[in-house]
Image: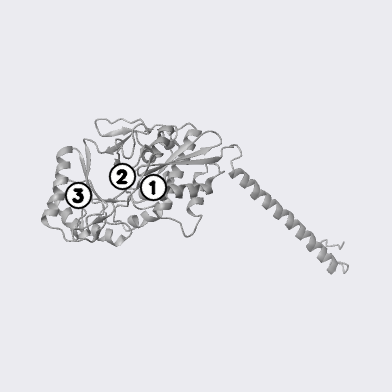
């Protein structure tokens, strides 16, 4: 070997052959380092796999009853979780959620965010939209239900713990929302405006000066008509106008914000964080109303709340589901800082067929209820009764609205 000590010149014996031997040794060393890196990646992957837990998703059951598809996700530990598909054609929603199960079968159900992303990003051409996101919501809620049951705690504890002791809801003697009774044409008559005012006056008289009145325009009152209505309802101190425009065109909401000085609320038909961003950036909405079963489940509703918090916009969650959807939404509400009021229809037999689902709740004199019980969602399901109801013939008919002149109306 050549003597390369300080002060000595390289020996002529150190030639090309020695150089190639040295390069070969370096390459070999690099190969060993690379192998160590791969091994480290494998080790990290093993850690992500949660070796301490053997729980895995093993099955799905779906039950179509009325407007809702009830979804049960089963595991090899005997713990199951429940969710629901609502707000779409249940014939399609049932098939979609059963198809999505292919992506979560055999997975650890506690990797909820990972599985949400796996479903959402699995197919570049099907990503987003009501059919996919509503079906994903059912699975997401069921996974949170499993996680809560696995660790014997309410879901809101897994979301950071409660930020409030009670949740304000409507409808109660102190909070009423009224519908427009539409749909209405673009050019309203004084009689049209008076009809809407009569509904709002009825609600104000019912709750009194200490109560809250909300007006749900339901996207059925076109902008020109809504501007007239908004100018006339100021004496009734409306808490907010819901769905002032059809979602999808932010320019409409910007125009209405310029013309109406009553708080505006929307969000029940906006799915995932991506569709609510424009409302916040353009500052044209005062209140966001995500529906847990429409926007992608508990995972997305929690993220929407965080986005809204950055703009100091509170949530008034939309919720027209069974106790499964109600409980999921209440758990998120229990854990977020900025909240106004929650939609609540527990006695609606069409959404909650008697005897099938049970969730404990009680109103107080202030029109609030306690935090949702646990573990998990805190909803009991009589699966035998549910299966019997689902075995009966189920029907679905597409809705649709028309104006007096025969043209198609928004609703």
Whole-percent x, y for residue 249 in the image? 31, 61
Q: Would you call the spot at circle 1 few (<14 residues within 10 Å), some (14-19), or many (20 or more)? A: many
- What crowding class fits label 2: few (fewer than 14 Cα within 10 Å), some (14-19), or many (20 or more)? many
Give the residue number, with chain letter if any, for mark 1.
Answer: 90
Q: Nearer the viewer, residue 5 or 281?
A: 281
Q: CA distance from mark 3 to mark 2?
A: 22 Å
Q: Are marks 3 and 2 in contact (CB under 8 Å)?
A: no
Task: Please state which of residues 381 and 145 is positioned toward the viewer in this rendering.
Answer: 381
Q: Is residue 201 visible?
A: yes
Q: Position of residue 161 (x, y in %)?
A: 42, 36
Left or right of residue 35, residue 222 in this image:
left
Q: Tag 2 or tag 3, which sits nearer the N-term?
A: 3
**Display coloring:** one colour
Residue 320: percent from left, percent from top: 32, 43
Residue assigned mark 2: 316
Q: Secondary structure at mark 3?
A: loop
Query: In the image, what residue occupies the spot 53% across and 48% down?
Result: 102
Q: Quadrant of the C terminus?
A: bottom left
The span from disc 3 to disc 1 (Cα, nearest Å) is 26 Å
Q: Nearer the viewer, mark 1 or mark 2?
A: 1
Q: Quadrant of residue 274?
A: bottom left
Query: Is 380 situated left or right of 183 in this image?
Result: right
Examine the rendered structure and indicate whether residue 236 appears above or below residue 153.
below
Label 1 and label 2: CA atoms lie apart by 26 Å
**Between disc 3 and disc 1, whose residue precedes?**
1
Residue under circle 3? 181
Mark with earlier residue (1, 2) = 1
Residues under numbered marks 1 and 2 in contact, where contact means CB atoms less than 8 Å apart: no
* Circle 3 crowding by C-alpha within 10 Å: few under 14, some 14–19, many from 20: some
> Which quadrant of the figure contains the N terminus?
bottom right
Query: Which element is circle 1 on?
Result: helix
The image shows residue 290 at horizontal and vertical percentages of 35, 48
């Amino acid at each position: 070997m050549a003597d390369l000590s300080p002060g000595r010149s390289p020996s002529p014996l150190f030639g090309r052959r020695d150089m190639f031997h040295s390069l070969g040794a370096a390459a070999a060393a690099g190969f060993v380092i690379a192998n160590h890196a791969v091994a480290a990646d494998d080790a990290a992957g093993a850690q992500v796999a949660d070796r301490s837990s053997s729980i895995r998703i093993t099955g799905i059951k779906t039950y179509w009853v009325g407007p809702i598809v009830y979804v049960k996700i089963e595991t090899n530990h005997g713990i199951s979780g429940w969710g629901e598909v609502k707000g779409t054609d249940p014939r399609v929603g049932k098939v979609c959620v059963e198809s999505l199960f292919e992506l979560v079968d055999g997975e650890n159900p506690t990797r909820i965010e990972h599985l949400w992303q796996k479903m959402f990003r699995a197919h570049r051409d099907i990503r987003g939209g009501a059919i996919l996101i509503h079906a994903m919501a059912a699975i997401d809620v069921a996974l949170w239900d499993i996680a809560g049951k696995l660790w014997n705690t309410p879901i809101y504890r897994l979301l950071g713990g409660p930020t409030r002791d009670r949740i304000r809801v409507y409808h109660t003697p102190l909070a009423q929302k009224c519908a427009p009774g539409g749909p209405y044409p673009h050019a309203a008559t004084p009689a049209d405006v008076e009809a809407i005012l009569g509904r709002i006056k009825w609600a104000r008289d019912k709750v009194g000066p200490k109560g809250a009145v909300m007006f749900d325009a339901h996207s059925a009152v076109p902008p020109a008509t809504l501007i007239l209505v908004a100018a006339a309802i100021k004496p009734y101190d409306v808490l907010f106008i819901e769905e002032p425009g059809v979602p999808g065109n932010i320019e409409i909401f910007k125009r209405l914000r310029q013309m109406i000085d009553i708080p505006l609320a929307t969000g029940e038909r906006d799915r995932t964080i991506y569709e609510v961003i424009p409302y916040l950036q353009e500052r044209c909405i005062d209140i966001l109303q995500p529906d847990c079963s429409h926007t992608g489940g508990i995972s997305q509703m929690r993220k929407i709340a965080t986005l809204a918090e950055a703009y100091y916009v509170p949530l008034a969650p939309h919720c027209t589901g069974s106790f499964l959807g109600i409980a999921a939404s209440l758990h998120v509400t229990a854990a977020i800082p900025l909240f106004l009021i929650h939609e609540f229809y527990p006695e609606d037999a069409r959404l909650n067929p008697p005897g099938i689902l049970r969730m404990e709740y009680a109103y107080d004199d202030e029109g609030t209820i306690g935090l949702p019980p646990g573990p998990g969602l805190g909803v009991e399901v009589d699966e035998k009764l549910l299966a019997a109801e689902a075995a009966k013939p189920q029907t679905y008919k597409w809705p649709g609205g028309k104006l007096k002149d025969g043209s198609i109306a928004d609703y």
